[in-house]
Amino acid sequence: MNNNLLLSLIVAAQFVTSAQATDVKIKKGPFKADWESLSEWTCPEWFKDAKFGIWAHWGPQCHAEDGDWYARFMYYEGSGQYNWHVSHYGNPAEFGMKELCNDWKAQNWDPEELVNLYKSVGARYFMALGNHHDNFDLWDSPYQEWNSVNMGPKKDIVKGWSDACKKAGLPMGVSIHASHAWTWMEPSQRYDGNLTKDDGKGKWWEGYDPQELYAQNHEHSKNWENSGTIHSQWDWGNGASLPSEQYKRKFQNRVLELVNDYSPAMLYFDDTAMPFYGCDDEIGKNILTHYYNKNVSRKVKNPQVVVMGKQLTPDQKKYMMWDVERGIPDRMQKDYWQTCTCIGSWHYEQSVYKNNYYKSGATVIRMLVDIVSKNGNLLLSVPIKSDGTLDDKEMKVLSDIKAWMDINGESIYGTRTWETFGEGPLADAVNPMNAQGFNEGQRYSSRDVRYVKKNNTIYATVMAWPETGDFMMRSFSKSANYCKGKVTSVRLLGYGDVSFKHNDEGLTVNVPSTHPNEIAPVFAITIK
């Protein structure tokens, strides 16, 4: 090797090292790193119009195809996932999460095909998993060497999704969960979680530092051994080991670099509010400041982007959007919000498939209708198998959703809340949420109706088909005082005009014996 080439390689290596050691600069602009300034953000109209998104919650934990939180429970001796792991891969001390990351190949993944499928089903935005609590970045991440380009699939997963979304015309978001790896991966300390870079000599991961993935060079949280089935250390309290400044700075750099490189339209944080809320507000402020300032211009004063977080206070809902996990508020919300849920486990699980535990298309549609009536959006996760494909039962769920949306989509997209979200037994019932949600599973009936409006049309969805004949909606009664005009026509979507009678008691519509779909009828009611 000649001296000039050697010198060039040395300079290049120094540049890479220094680049990775340099913090990403926070974009300057009209938004400042304080909550009052950040509260100038408002939810963009495109997101309010979209209503329905699909999420690919897909990463190396899906390789085991044994359900959610696999990277944590594979280290809990006696748990089902530990037993599965030992029977398929061996002792986690020898084949740990790092090996799972490398063993995952995503060999049949076709992002363009999947994104086109999601769009055809009715999704108007898409969410990609950027990393999970396993701390593995699914993009060409200069601040996390444990990523999908360096090992495993050897592919930039986020870029693949991004390119497909651009081609399909779908806004793309990225979900970030890695702030919790500090405590979430603590069970690995009994196995391979304390390995260092020096331990990799002669192994496949030689040159990589396991601590960059596991982040376990710290004392255990208090009572960590008893937290396998509960979230005792989810928030940065209750005895949780507090993250180091280096760990927090690395996380911030990863997110800011992601924003710079991929320009996502949405960021989803699987956190109580923003990452490290409760022990360090500055990280959240820095991320929001950078993200919002990156998305403003002379023509666009309000950033046309959305940041999602959980368990928000009223003040926090001013600078970001509330996300509800696997649940629905029982009342209409003033501030725009979103439900995130999954048709099965968050990570792909073979037993869900074998035991027919997927949500049905009908369940998804009824949740969507209820959510939209209460001023929200639905983000639906459809688990992807290790190889990057969907199974046949998931395809059936998507097909059923599509069949309803093809006929009734006008009652979803671009609508806004009416004077009341609905009527019927569930509208009158109290259904409190547990922590960040977890109150889904409502049994909607033919007596439950949900309302939205668009211009001079009120869309009334009966959550299950009522009997043929007359059906009364009492929200149109004189005493309810919601309807401010005269009903001039009623159209059953997918069928046509139906007869009706509007008087002081309410609106009575005729339900035909012919059903354009078998999930829920939608009546378009024109008001003059």
Image (cartoon, grey):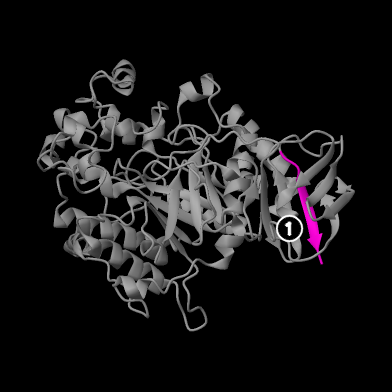
Q: Locate residue 389 relative to residue 18 in the image: left or right.
A: right
Say whether residue 387 is magenta: no
Q: Quadrant of the C terminus?
A: bottom right
Of all residues, the one furthest to the top in this rendering is 87
Q: Residue at x 32, y 36 (%)?
A: 101
Residue 296 placement (x, y as % from top left): 45, 76
**Secondary structure under the numbered disc 1 in the rendered image:** strand
Q: Please give the count of numbered marks on the rendered protein.
A: 1
As drawn, which residue projects farthest toward the bottom?
298
Q: Which residues are magenta?
A: 520-528
Residue 401 rendering spot, x and y as whole percentages: 66, 40
Instruction: Out of 310 and 460, give the one closest to the viewer.
Output: 460
Question: Is 24 or 374 nearer to us in this picture?
Answer: 374
The answer, for residue 192, to whether it is visible in the render is no
Horizontally, is 252 left or right of 499 in the view? left
Taken as a whole, is the magenta stretch helix, strand or loop?
Answer: strand
Q: Quadrant of residue 404?
A: top right
Give whichever of 244, 413 is nearer the camera: 413
Task: Give residue 151's position: percent from left, percent from top.
Answer: 33, 41
Name the quadrant of the N terminus.
bottom left
Q: Tag 1: Cα neighbours inside 10 Å, few (<14), some, or many (≥20)?
A: many
Could you tell whether 76 is left or right of 196 in the image? right
Report the residue at 36% width, 76% height from top: 31
Judging by the rendered image, the residue that carries numbered circle 1 is 458
In the rendered image, residue 436, in percent from the top left (x then y), is placed at 39, 45
To which quarter of the image does residue 227 belong? top left
Is residue 296 visible in the rendered image? The answer is: yes
